[in-house]
Amino acid sequence: MEPRKTREAVFKHIGSVQLPDLLMEVDAATHFSAALLARRPSSSNE
């Protein structure tokens, strides 16, 4: 039952959003793409 409550809390907080948009927002806040690349991205396509 706990995963359902967590899911509902997340949806209530962020609302309806597309996964690519969410990933871009998370990356902008955390810079995880730089960690994955082991360097700063050289373009927005990376």
Image (tube, grey):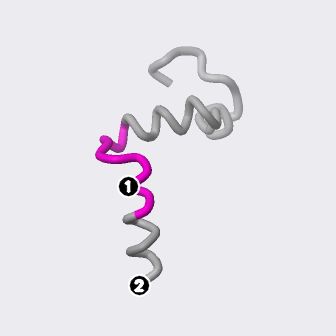
Please identify the quarter of the rendering in which residue 40 is found.
top right
Please identify the quarter of the rendering in which residue 9 is found.
bottom left
Local SS, label 1: helix
Q: From the viewer's perspective, is residue 6 above or below residue 10? A: below
Q: Nearer the viewer, residue 5 or 37?
A: 5
Percent position of residue 41, x then y:
60, 22
- What amino acid is labelled 1 in the image? Lys
Percent position of residue 5, x then y:
42, 73
Alpha carbon distance from label 2 to label 1: 17 Å
Q: Which residues are magenta?
A: 9-20
Q: Which residue is mark 1?
A: 12
Local SS, label 2: loop
Q: From the viewer's perspective, is residue 10 above or below residue 32? A: below
1 relative to 29 in the view: left or right: left
Q: Name the residue rendered at 30%, 41% in the picture.
A: 18
Magenta span: predominant SS is helix
Q: Is residue 19 magenta?
A: yes
Q: Residue furthest top?
A: 43
Q: Name the residue rendered at 68%, 38% in the picture.
A: 35
Percent position of residue 33, x then y:
59, 34
- What amino acid is labelled 2 in the image? Met
Q: Which residue is mark 2?
A: 1
Of label 2 and label 1, which has the lower sequence position?
A: 2
Q: From the viewer's perspective, is residue 4 above or below residue 19? A: below
Percent position of residue 28, x then y:
57, 29
Q: Nearer the viewer, residue 36 or 13?
A: 13
Asked whether the residues under the numbered discs 2 and 1 touch, taking CB atoms below 8 Å apart as contact, a structural biologist would say no
